[in-house]
């Protein structure tokens, strides 16, 4: 019995992720009715619009009046056979739970707490998603002026001496800007992300010359795998910017993508300065300053899409370079390039 109650509570919570005005409210009301063994259950939002299960009851007008009183007073009211409980989310009135014919008032109070917890969780998840999207927009606009200046300077210097190469680099630069700033869908493919990586590295090789050696390998069977947009490029930019540029001598960046069973595994590795593993943890948690925004955003978006067991794995040590690994399912329902 306890298992079925917990399962029903989870179902109700899932249906209320979009709030009391979302598409799952009627299903949540049905679940509450079964849970409470009640005749009728309704969930009303701040507009007073109530969604009933199973249907609008014969005392619908009285119930609506009761909802309006609760919304204006924020106090619980009861009138046989109705009980109306205000739902406060984050100390603010969010709506009303109405129950008719429940055998126990204590169960109604407990159910109202479950509804409030579900609404609070939905708000938190929505806030986290909004924050991730805001950071993604920041990533799209976060093009280093230093990199742009150096790339254009190199291209200009080659116009007379190597016009063909200058033209190729200018096309690469245009591709890089377009991919970074254009309004893409939420998801892209491994092929498109690797194309963006190769474009960026071609420009950086022109800027850094022999100081930067790169190797990019991707298995054909993972090219069509869908993944969140702008996941890999920030990892490669981070490897060049923080691993190779500050060091002396030649640095190497390796990018690999391959299939491992049902997963696609992509790694970005550099032999640069590396960092303290504790600092890497701070960066992934978003506490590493402005330079951590890219990695923290990528990690958060991966976990949001694929679950908490996915995300970035960072292997590093001071003076030993850095390896960042992305593991994603090769097939994930709902993840399709747009």
Image: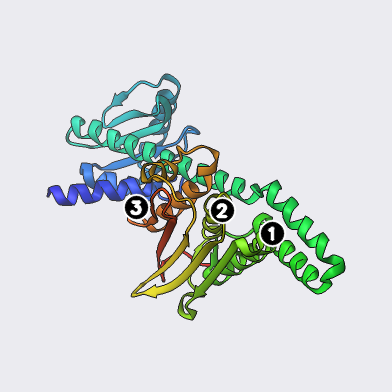
Of tags 1 and 3, the one toward the viewer is 1
- In the rendered image, residue 313, in percent from the top left (x then y), is placed at 38, 55
Label tally: 3
Comes first in the chain, label 3 or label 2:
2
Please tell me which residue is depicted at 37% across the width and 40% down the height of the picture.
Answer: 121
Viewed as shown, does residue 11 lie left or right of 167?
Answer: left
The residue at which mark 1 appears reads as: 207
Q: Which residue is mark 2?
A: 248
Q: CA distance from mark 3 to mark 2?
A: 38 Å
Q: Is residue 13 above or below residue 177?
A: above
Question: Measured along the vertical axis of the image, is residue 247 above or below residue 327?
Answer: above
Residue 49 drawn at (x, y percent):
47, 38
Horizontal placement of 92 versus 112: left or right? right
Q: Quadrant of the C terminus?
A: bottom right
Residue receiving disc 3: 308
Disc 3, SS: loop
Cα–Cα span, label 1 and label 3: 38 Å
Q: Residues within 10 Å of mark 3 (few under 14, many from 20)?
A: few
Q: How is the image coloured?
A: rainbow
Q: Position of residue 285 (x, y in %)?
A: 41, 42
Q: Earlier in the sequence, mark 1 or mark 3?
A: 1
What is the secondary structure assignment of the residue under circle 2?
loop
Question: Visible in this render: residue 334?
Answer: no
Horizontal side, residue 36 vs residue 211: left or right: left
Residue 146: give its label: none
């Amino acid at each position: 019995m306890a298992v079925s109650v917990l399962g029903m509570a989870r179902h109700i919570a899932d249906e209320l992720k979009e709030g009391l005005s979302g598409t799952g409210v009627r299903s949540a009301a049905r679940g509450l009715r079964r849970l409470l063994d009640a005749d009728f259950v309704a969930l009303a939002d701040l507009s007073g619009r109530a969604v009933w299960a199973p249907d609008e009851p014969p005392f619908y007008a009285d119930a609506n009046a009761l909802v309006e009183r609760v919304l204006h007073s924020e106090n619980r009211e009861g009138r046989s056979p109705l009980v109306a409980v205000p739902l406060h989310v984050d100390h603010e009135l969010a709506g009303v739970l109405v129950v008719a014919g429940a055998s126990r008032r204590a169960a109604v109070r407990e159910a109202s707490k479950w509804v409030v917890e579900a609404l609070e969780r939905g708000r938190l998840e929505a806030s986290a998603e909004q924050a991730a999207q805001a950071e993604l927009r920041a990533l799209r606009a976060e093009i280093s002026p230093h990199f742009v200046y150096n790339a254009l300077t190199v291209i200009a210097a080659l116009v007379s001496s190597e016009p063909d190469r200058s033209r190729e680099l200018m096309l690469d630069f245009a591709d890089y800007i377009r991919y970074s700033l254009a309004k893409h869908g939420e998801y892209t493919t491994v092929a498109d992300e690797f194309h963006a990586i190769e474009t960026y590295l071609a420009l950086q090789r022109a800027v850094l010359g022999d100081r930067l050696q790169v190797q990019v390998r991707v298995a054909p069977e993972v090219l069509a795998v869908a993944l969140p947009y702008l996941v890999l490029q920030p990892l490669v930019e981070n490897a060049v910017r923080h691993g190779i540029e500050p060091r002396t001598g030649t640095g190497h960046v390796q990018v690999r993508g391959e299939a491992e069973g049902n997963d696609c595994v992509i790694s970005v590795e550099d032999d640069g300065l590396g960092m303290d593993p504790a600092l890497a943890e701070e960066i992934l948690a978003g506490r590493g300053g402005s330079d951590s925004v890219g990695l923290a955003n990528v990690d958060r978006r991966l976990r949001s899409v694929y679950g908490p067991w996915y995300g970035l794995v960072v292997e590093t040590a001071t003076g030993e370079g850095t390896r960042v690994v992305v593991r994603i399912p090769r097939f994930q329902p709902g993840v399709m390039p747009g």
